[in-house]
Amino acid sequence: MGFSFVLLQIVIVEFLFLNFMEYDFKKIEAEWKKYWNDNHVYKVSNENDKPKCYVLDMFPYPSGAGLHVGHPLGYIASDIYARYKRLKGFNVLHPMGFDAFGLPAEQYAIETGQHPAVTTEKNIARYREQLDNIGFCYDWSREVRTSDPKYYKWTQWIFLQLFHSWYDHKADKAQPVSELIALFEKEGNQNVACPGDETLHFDALKWNDFSEKEKREALMQYRLAYQGYAQVWWCEALGTVLANDEVVNGVSERGGHPVERKNMRQWFLRITEYAERLLASLDNLDWTEPMKEMQRNWIGKSVGAEVRFGLTPALSEGEGAVDQNSGITVFTTRPDTVFGVDFMVLAPEYELVDDITTEEQKEAISQYKTYVKSRSERERMSEVKQVTGCFTGAYARHPLTNKNIPIWISEYVLAGYGTGAIMAVPSGDDRDHAFAKHFGIPITNIFGDKYTGEEAYSAKTGTIENSEFLSGMSIAEASEAAIDELVDDGAGRRKVNYKLRDAGFSRQRYWGEPFPIIYVDDIPYGIDEPIIHNEHKLGSLPVELPMVAYYKPGPEGQGPLANIEDWVETDAGERETNTMPGYAGSSWYFLRYMDPHNDTEFASRKATDYWNQVDVYIGGNEHAVGHLLYSRMWTKALYDLGHIGFDEPFKKMLNQGMIQGQSYFMNSFMGSELLPGENEVKVVMISSDENLEKFKIPFDLNGKMHVSASGNVVPLRIKYGHTYIDTKNRLTKSKFLEYINAVPTGLILSVENVYWKGQTENGEEYIQCSLEIEKMSKSKYNVVNPDDIVAQYGADTFRMYEMFLGPIDVSKPWDTKGIEGVHRFLKKLWRLYADEQKGWLINDDAPTNDELRILHKTIKKIEEDVERFAFNTSVSQFMICVNELTALSCHKRGILEPLALTICPFAPHIAEELWHQLGHTTSVISANFPKYDEQYTRENSKVYPVAINGRTRLEMEFPLDTQKATIEQAVMADENVVKWMEGKPLKKFIFVEGKMINVVV
RNA sequence: GCCCCGAUGGCGGAAUUGGUAGACGCGCCAGACUCAAAAUCUGGUAUUCGCAAGGAUGUGCAGGUUCGAUUCCUGUUCGGGGCACCA
């Protein structure tokens, strides 16, 4: 014992002496993080002569699971870019904050009683710690949190701007509602079509006669933030509205209660008024084409016609008659098919349905509507093979032929889509065709031979037949002619339709921004309006979210705020009890970073003019249409109203791919699972079907089988599987024991129950497991914490490894295979500067040409790569550079000082350490990025691949400025070329300068 | 179902504008150093035929355009993301 203690001491002493110049990333990283923090190295000023550059990350939602290795992928990329730009002489704004309102915190509050503000605070602290650990150059003095009253004060303020605005199509911009009122007083609304209700018409006289309520209701149809009705998931048992996410397989995720669609009064943003501008200005953005394409598709502009079908006399006469004016208007992109209409389909929610349904059909229609209430929009759109519907018994009148057209309802027509009604042309549309076949509705053929009777002819070529005056015309001609005729008859008009729908802006939740709205006699007013502000002194923002003791929903599906009577009731009236959705705060946060502590404005005009648009925005493409579209709309609205000087928020947009998790499942295992909160034992059989057969597993052992919907046995997930599984996806007996001891699985697991698949090379028994790539998420137990990686290898290795994994925009599973290589590279880099035994190695010898070539090529490559965001190839180049310099035993300051600067954006800690070791006293980030010298990057000859008939056969070297004729002569004279030509005559000689030579015979 | 993306060695990937497919790293194999191990270094490593020289094949699959295709076009399969209240 004593002996080995002495030995240990010797070893330690030896270790300390011999390794004093070792690459000690722990020490280095801790030291420089402290230095950066203490010296405010990353603080950015709004006053600066340098050109500006705004590099932004999508801010995270601080979830309880903490940051996982997938989050930093984009952050590292933007950090590299920000540091690079700073070294290149830009004043770089690179901020970070938190999207802190959201459903999960509230859900957690419901379950545990902890206030969302408390858990959010805690989660943010954790995120901050994890982010700091990676060494980002954020200016934390500019941090924003959407749940901070100082922040959401301005979210509410912007909401009020939208509430007090309308979209003026003549000026093509948002204008204050006050101007609209002035207009109405003068001439009514005859010159400003009403976006919310096309049937709303009034003159000045009528307007002035309107009551306050009527006026406000009319204005509501114009406002950019307005109230309307929308369907939500209503869960009777929980007494609450559920998010789409919380509804799984048609029942509530919590408790498995039934849910149904319910119409509720909601706030909306009239984003549809911006549809055309959002579409048009995409062309000028430096976004990826797929990203723009997704937005275009989401906006979904289509040109066609609106066609009005009248109702048959039977419906509009006699007792219980339907109003003669209430025909059915449809939108169609194919007016040319109007003579092929065999029936009409209304969305089951369509208002008129109950009025027109005949006595005989009432029961059937009612039953069908009940069924549809249980269906999500997604299901209704995607399950196309399943045809459902119901006949109303009523008929419409075809506007051109006067024929009776049966009116059906079906779930495949969505209420919020177009007009909520379609004219069905079975011979030309697949779904209409399937519907007609299914219900035996006779089909009119308007495509002649093209329609076979088997399937619809939906191609957009050919001529229209059997269609009166349209017969023989091409589709384009027929469309025009049909629209002209419909317009003449007063039965239709040309129409541009957008798939884009107004954005629902209400949530029946607690943890979100309260609306700055008070109802006076049931009329909603902004709290900045005189009736509230002057008379009741309630007008100041923010409307703070009150503390609550519990998070139960309010009466009739209202949010929890409805329960707080003191808060709801004010002198002026009742407060709005809904809160704003998650995207409210995130729609404008990039503006707040520019001037985060401003108490009097959301951001000063000076600050927004200086920083202007975000130069580079990096984030996941799951936000391609949601967040990015809303931000664009808010920016345009703020621009229209004169608050900012630009109308697009993000000049350049880059997507980061998702880092997926690796989940492991046992394929051959038998055990039993204790159901959560119950004493019931569920048998979990984990096996391939062959094993089920083979071992005749008693299904009825102690309880139920764990069987999926498809009837297959569900494989058992191994939580945090990556720490237990070997390289051949096997769980060995010892690891299995370790697993069941360490991880609470909720299972009764015992070794006796295990069916061992076989034995490993070492003779150990194992369970065969399978690997699945899934989203990295806490609930899937496949999350990898960056802290663990940083602790083991350091932040610089982690940063470079994430970049080395591949292009940032590609999704890939997380795998630590290969991280060693990157770590080795950094150690090798270090050894160019310092030797573990001999210490500091830098000398002032003059660099050789070879060394200079390596350096300058590297600088050039890094510059090109960073500018095009190809960081994976940068890492490769650094490796090549270090390998070559190592081979040359280069320890020269003239090479290694610029190299330290070049690698600084990627590995800032080691760069800072080396920079200071080289004798500098200020931060490496304040230095200048080295410039490459072309004389070292230019080659003067090229080894050309010579191909015969496109197949590379040999190589020949020529000086770069050699003429084609000279090369041709030399190539044709080469004996190898002659051999490969096999005596055939030369057909063509292709020479691409600097690339290749091809001899065609 | 609709929209968008992807598929290249055992693995992550490279090939930037249609011009030498497999850079760089991991893994694996062999060797050096070492009492030994770790660390480090050197060489090899797409498949296939061949002792070798060398040849043939090869970028999910089937076609097409081209002197030349991982790259462009058409179709198709599989995987991922989004589809409007998760963020």
Image (tube, coloured by chain):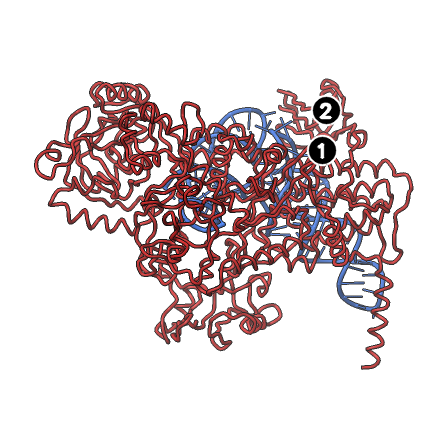
Chain colours: A red, B blue
Secondary structure beneath dot 2 equals helix
Picture layout, residue A807 above or below residue A166? below
Say which quarter of the image contains residue A979.
Answer: top right
Picture layout, residue A726 above or below residue A901? below
**Crowding at label 2, few (<14), some or many (≥20) Cα neighbours within 10 Å?**
many
Label 1 sits on what residue type?
A: Lys
The picture places residue B34, in percent across and down from the top left corner, at: 85, 65
Ranked by sequence position, the earlier of labels 1 and 2 is: 1
Nearest the camera: A353 or A468? A353
Nearest the camera: A536 or A212? A536
**Crowding at label 1, few (<14), some or many (≥20) Cα neighbours within 10 Å?**
few
Q: Which residue is mark 1?
A: A50
Q: Which residue is mark 2?
A: A971
Nearest the camera: A793 or A471? A793
The picture places residue A61, in percent across and down from the top left corner, at: 53, 51
Label 2 sits on what residue type?
A: Val
